[in-house]
Image (tube, grey):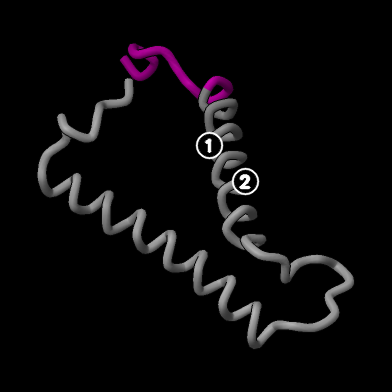
Amino acid sequence: MMKSMASLSLGLQRGLKIFFVLCALVTLLDFVILGFIGAGYDPHGWRSFGFHSLYGFVASVVLVLVATMLRRIVMRDEDYYD
């Protein structure tokens, strides 16, 4: 269950804020670098704005889903080694 931001500890709140600011900064830098340095023809579309951020997010979601399915296959009973 997701907790509200107010119920989290002060250190965790600060850490999450820093994390979100860094994510926004990296996405903004992606736009700036692609806008000035990476301008030009791109036949594959890999240099489009936010591609790497979106690719990383999708890869993380797929990793979690595959791990959940793998857990169901590999999981043993609690008394398996007894």
Quarter occupied by residue 20: bottom left
**Whole-percent x, y for residue 1 in the image:** 32, 20
Return the residue at label 2: 58
Other-residue count near label 1 (Cα within 10 Å), few / some / many at <14 / 14–19 / ≥20: few
Please report the residue visible at 75 percent of the width from the left and 67 percent of the height from the top: 46
Q: Is residue 2 above or below residue 33?
A: above
Left or right placement of residue 52 versus residue 19 in this view: right
State yes or no: discs 2 and 1 in contact (Cβ < 8 Å): no
Kind of residue sitting beneath label 1: Val
Foreground of the two, 71 or 36: 36
Considering the whole magenta stretch, tell me its main secondary structure: loop
Q: For the point 26% across and 26% down, which residue is it?
A: 3
Magenta span of residues: 72-82
**Height in image: 44 above or below 58?**
below
Crowd tier of the residue under label 2, counting other residues whose Cα lies within 10 Å: few below 14, some 14–19, many 20 or above: few
Left or right for 23, reference 71? left
Magenta stretch contains residue 74 = yes
Disc 2 marks a residue whose amino acid type is Val
User: Going by the image, does 75 lie left or right of 33?
Assistant: left
Q: Residue at x 65, y 79 (%)?
A: 35
Q: Mark 1 highlights which residue?
A: 64
Secondary element at tag 1: helix
Helix, strand or loop at mark 2: helix
How far across and down, in percent of the image, does residue 11 sit?
Answer: 12, 49
Residue found at x 43% / y 60%: 24
- Of circles 2 and 1, the one toward us is 2
* Cα–Cα gap, marks 2 and 1: 10 Å
Answer whether residue 18 is magenta in the image: no
Q: Residue furthest left?
A: 10
**Residue found farthest to the bottom:** 37
The quadrant holding residue 78 is top left
Labels 2 and 1: the sequence-earlier one: 2
